[in-house]
Image (cartoon, grey):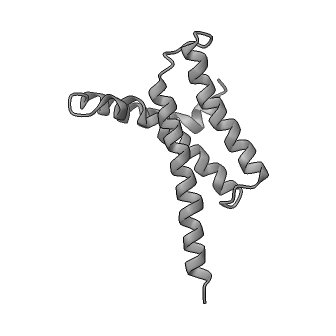
Amino acid sequence: MQPWFWAVTGAGERWGLGFFSRLQALGTSLPDWMLYNLPDALWLFACLSMIQGVWGFRWGREALAWGSLLVIGAMGSEALQAAGILEGTGDWGDVVGYGGAVVLMYWAFNLSTTRLYAYMFSS
C-alpha cells in the first residue's frame, strides 16, 4: 500500500480494530451477528450514504450505478468466498446484513426525506 493511504486510513483503522476487540471481549453478552455481521452491514450503509451525499441525496443514474456496483461487489465477494474462489469464510449472515443495509438506506433516504420535503415545502 501507498504511504498516503495509511496516513489517511491508519488512525481510523486502529480505532476500529480497537473497538472491535473490545466488542469481542463482550462476546459472552452479545450475539454473534452483532459482533461479526453488523459491522459489515454498517459499512455498506455508510458507503451508500456517502454515495447519496455525493449526488445530492437523490438516486439518479450515477448514484444508482455506483450504489449497485457497491452492493453487487459486497454480496458477490461473499458468494465467491462461499464458493471457494476468494479467500474467506463466505458468511451468509453478511449477505442478510447487506440486504438489511439496502432496505434501511431505501427507507432512510427515500421514504423519510420525501415526507420531510412534503412537510417543509407545503405552505
Q: Which of 71 and 8 is in front in this view?
A: 71
Q: Which residue is drawn at 52% across and 33% down?
A: 10
Q: Can residue 100 be seen in this view?
A: yes
Q: Residue at x 69, y 40 (%)?
A: 68
Q: Where is residue 39 in the image (x, y as percent from the top left)?
A: 44, 36
Quarter of the image where the N terminus is located: top right
Q: Can residue 12 be seen in this view?
A: no
- The residue lying furthest to the bottom in this view is 123
Q: Which residue is drawn at 55% across and 71% down?
A: 115
The answer to whether 100 appears left or right of 68 in the picture is: left
Q: Which residue is drawn at 24% across and 32% down?
A: 26
- The residue lying furthest to the right in this view is 61
Quarter of the image where the C terminus is located: bottom right
The answer to whether 90 appears left or right of 110 in the picture is: left
- The residue lying furthest to the left in this view is 28
Count of picture labels: 0
Q: Position of residue 49 (x, y in %)?
A: 59, 51
Based on the displayed image, in which of its 4 quarters is residue 53 positioned?
A: bottom right
- The residue lying furthest to the top in this view is 84
Q: Where is residue 43 in the image (x, y as percent from the top left)?
A: 52, 39
In the rendered view, tell whether residue 72 sits above or below residue 50: above
Based on the displayed image, in which of its 4 quarters is residue 122 positioned?
A: bottom right
